[in-house]
Image (cartoon, rainbow, N blue to C red):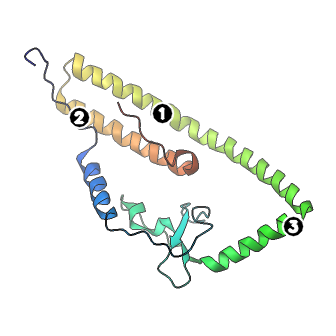
Amino acid sequence: MSKAIKIAVPPIVPEDKWNIAHSRLSNNKHLKSREKGVFTLQGLIKCGICGCSYGADHSWKYGNYICRGKLKSAHVDGSPKCTNRNIRADQLEQVVWKRVMDIINDPNKLEPMCIEAIDKLKERESALETRLLPMERRLKEIAEMKSRLVDKWVIENMDTEKYRLAQQALDKEESRLITLRRETDPTRWRNWKRPEI
């Protein structure tokens, strides 16, 4: 250790984000899983107002689907909660199941619907790629800028305060783009984790 070069290393995660994450983890310990029936459409229904998915709400007599945009945890940034209404689970599932059975039992309906669904998915994929490509480019640029910033700090002995401010600005922009990317295509980026540096 006598030959080691000692350098103060700034935290990877800003303190405010660390505190929010720690608070959420603490609160999660108090949540209990509820097993009051199966909610077939959980996560498959999208809100027409905010775009969040609907999840199961067991607190009502019949069970409801509730927009996750109404939850406080979806708005840690202080943005307003969604105002869309809850949907009674049994009624919605009954309507959806009837529609599914009508389609399955009539091959003349099934084939055109499958073709239409595939076409829509291809259009959506193309539109998503068009929207995601600039975000991916910018995220790559930010990663390169962070790398150059670390080099300046270590090799060129950059002022620590300037380094910290520049790092915070890049982290903020990166977080914004990652959130935007996740909201643009939640199915692809749901389980994505930022690579460790």
Can you identify the residue that label 2 sits on?
164
Q: Position of residue 98 (x, y in %)?
A: 77, 74
Locate residue 80: give its quadrant.
bottom left
Provide the secondary structure element on which disc 1 rests. Answer: helix
Give the mark nearest the N terminus, 2 or 1.
1
Q: Secondary structure at mark 2?
A: helix
Could you tell whether 130 is left or right of 23 in the image? right
Question: Quick one: label 2 or label 3, which is nearer the N terminus?
Answer: 3
Spatial separation of the CA atoms under disc 1 and disc 3: 49 Å
Per the image, label 3 sits on a secondary structure element best described as loop
- Name of the residue lying farthest toward the left: 2
Q: Which residue is mark 1?
A: 138
Residue visible at 46% across and 30% down?
Answer: 140
Residue type beneath disc 3: Asn
Residue underneath mark 3? 105
**Label 2 to label 1, Cα distance in Å?**
21 Å
Residue 110 place in picture, x, y as percent: 85, 59
Which amino acid type is marked by label 2? Arg
Q: In this rendering, does residue 104 appear at all?
A: yes
- Could you tell me residue 148's position as x and y percent? 33, 22
